[in-house]
Image (tube, rainbow, N blue to C red):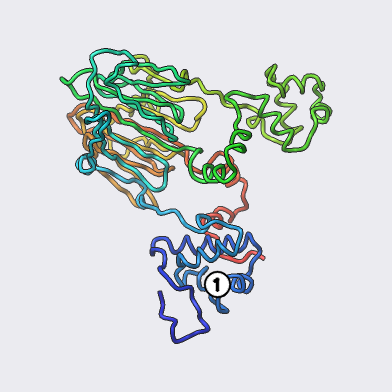
Amino acid sequence: MPDTASDPASETVPGSALGDDLQARAAALLRSTANDLKRNDRDAEADLSLAPGAFAEYTSGRRPVTWELIERAARVWPVNERDLLPVRDDAPTGVRVCRAKESAATSRVIERGGGPYYEYRDTAMSRLSSYRPEWIRMLRTVDDDAPDNPAVEWNKGHLLYQFTYFVGPVNYYHEWEGVRHCVPMTTGDSVWGLPFGPHSFAARSDAEPAYILALTYGGDLTGDAQREIAALGTDAARDLALPSGADGALLASFLRARAMSAEELARRSGLSPDRVHTLCTGAGRAEWSELAALAPALGVPVRELLAPATRAHDGVSVRKGAGVRRWTYPDARRPAYRIAELAGDPLHPHTSALEVEVLTREEGGPPLTTHQHQYAYVLGEAPVTASWTRDGRSHTERLEPGDSAYAVPGVPLSLAAPEGGPAPRLLLLRIRGAVTPDVRFALGAMAADGIDRYVAEDRLWY
């Protein structure tokens, strides 16, 4: 921070500045927030008790933004501190790697029921995504598949969604609506589970490794959505909740949002009032031709009238490895990878869980590029070479068995098998971040220079 003690006119807010890596984005957020509130430099300085010229110095980056300035702005303006805090980028090359030895160094034993129950290890995480992925070894062994085995210690369920990949003889226990279940699992099996379902795991044998990759993630439930709902309260959360697959509840919600009667929607869409009432109550499902008439009548895309429906049974979707769909990618003529589709659910269409067998030995081959945040874990005994480019720079890493990695959206990640060795296998879990399809469509509809300004607003617009 510059020394301003000799110049009272250049008043600054005292205290610790944000880190250098955050300053440019913090300055852009400060400018963007002032723009949204219609505060020019003079008005912002009056609101925040700053000397003339100080606000321009903050928003231009000539003076570092401090925590105290952010706190002052949050007290004076109708914003939260988090609105002015940039996200830390801990994957500047596009990929963040966690070595197996680094994972082992995080090992800790969790006790339940008076004895050791799990060994936990961290794997690759990033501040840019909601992944909280763990390697977990079962330390409790059972000799049956009874869901009420007294040796099994249950948790209370957690907020995060959980995709689980199984290695070795592991029993998966889950409870839904008071009923407990046990599913014997083995290597290659997987499961996707809804939040707050109690569950547990135990080994069926001490003779071979028994562990899981518990890839938990927040999805849309964490972050701003959870904080907003927490402020609104439980009653509001219950009112906002929409049942799975409830097209009628979704349609009725749009009518309330537009203060529109069923009769008015019928008049606009050409459907009969009775039919609109039937659709709103959920007593019937709209045909495609009806959706095509209702959507423009409401001024929304057709997709907004289609409610996603979970296929989870008793809170989980289980997929056995022996019966999963498999195909080659990019295509059968150029089979660089053999893909297996693991557990998932239509409730999360932008979550993809895949087991990838690397067939190509050519570095820089067909990339596995996606709009999603991407997590990778090297299974089996064979290493793999990962290569990618970002900001015009090329990168290559050799990933050994047990290594894991995180890749930011859009990184063209290419994988190659070693010469003369077996084909490597990786687990990939891809999830959507805060950039929803609505945001992506909005970016695509912006004016020519809009995206650059959206990323880092740098000017007063009025």
Quadrant in the picture for the N terminus: bottom left
Q: Residue at x 48, y 73 (%)?
A: 13
Q: Is residue 38 left or right of residue 423?
A: right
Amino acid under label 1?
Phe
Q: Is residue 380 above or below residue 63?
A: above
State the residue in front, 64 or 413.
64
State the residue in front, 123 or 302.
123
Q: Is residue 301 above or below residue 172?
A: below
State the residue in front, 322 or 281.
281
Q: How many marks can you see?
A: 1
Dot 1 lies on which element? Answer: helix
Across and down, in percent, residue 11 comes to: 50, 79
Residue sitting farthest toward the bottom = 6
Q: Which residue is tagged 1?
A: 55
Residue sitting farthest toward the front = 114
Quadrant in the picture for the C terminus: bottom right
State the residue in front, 179 or 41.
179
Residue 10 seen in the figure: yes
Q: Is residue 338 left or right of residue 40?
A: left
Across and down, in percent, residue 384 comes to: 25, 35
Across and down, in percent, residue 172 comes to: 33, 21
Q: Quadrant of residue 239?
A: top right
